Amino acid sequence: MKFLRLILLPGVVIYSTAIYIRNFLFDKNIFKQHEINIKVISVGNITVGGSGKTPLVIYLCELLKKTGYNIGVLSRGYRRKTSGYLLVSNGEKILASVEDSGDEIFQTARTCGIPAAASENRFEGAKQFMDDVKIDTLLLDDAFQHRWIKRDINLLIFEQNFLLDSSILNQSLLPTGNMREPFSSVRRADAIILNRKFSEKREIPEKVTAHFQNKSIFTASYKAIGFIDVTKNTSYSFIRALNLFKIDTTNQLLFIDHKNYSLKEVQQIRKEFYSTNSHSVITTEKDAVKLSTFAKELDDIDIFYLKIVLKIDHEDLFINFIKNTLN
């Protein structure tokens, strides 16, 4: 796989040219941003993989709810089975299945109890969303690259481990590296969140932090708060979290991110469970929302997900930043 990504190195030039032209057209106002008549917060990243966007979105939703904002979340609904605009939740009840809405927006709607919708066209989706529900603040999930809507706050999140690994297979643009945009795009952000997940805080190399000058910088981490029964209600960091609880993770089944489970995979889980004489199955919350639809098939297995929340260090400073910028 590494060799294949190195072979694709010439493709980086093509990809970077396309990114440069697109951003140039937005910067010169040739591609015009649309304004909507409520406050807009964007959460995004410039890397592929799990930087922590969904935990940050959930954290922001809970925070804004507590401070009196009527918040709604709009996502593209990555890897959902539907297309176009879809109202996932009206804030009182879930209106769509996880398969139709996508696991991330479904998880956010279920966890926070707020209005949520999915739409590939964020501007048209935002207009329809505001017609459907009463909100005064719109949170755009994974929208750093989606520049068609003008936003009041542009939040950019990085995983700490990504910033520490300067290898060509990491800090290069796609298709060789893991970057959706170059570090120069950080200039569009209003604030940066450095997510160390379950790792210790490390000093970020100066050649990276040079791109963060004149930006508000906040640090964050994950906190595991307990195990939840999937039928009743993988990544490095998830396995690391389980090891912190001294849980035996020898027997693992690894599926791709945003996996759409079928009966075939459920039977595979059952087979592995019984063949290894395991006591229980533990998964991520994002996978749990999909596996919960197979509650009948898994009713003889104890299957749980690890509930993880994101915590911002010096939260009072972050709250003041959000309030002052929105007002």
Image (tube, rainbow, N blue to C red):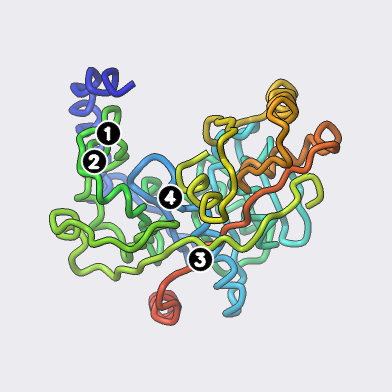
Between the C-alphas of marks 2 and 1, the distance is 6 Å
Q: Is residue 246 left or right of residue 148?
A: right
CB within 8 Å, label 1 to label 4: no
Q: In the drawing, what numbered circle is on residue 37?
A: 3
Q: Amino acid at mark 4?
A: Ala
Q: Earlier in the sequence, mark 1 or mark 4?
A: 4
CB within 8 Å, label 2 to label 1: yes
Q: Amino acid at mark 2?
A: Gln
Judging depth in this view, the residue of 61 and 312 nearest the camera is 312
Between the C-alphas of marks 2 and 4, the distance is 21 Å
Between the C-alphas of marks 3 and 4, the distance is 18 Å
Q: Earlier in the sequence, mark 3 or mark 2?
A: 3
Q: Residue at x 44, y 82 (%)?
A: 316
Query: Residue 122 appears at what percent x and percent y?
Result: 50, 47
Badge nearest the viewer, 3 or 1: 1
Badge nearest the viewer, 1 or 4: 1
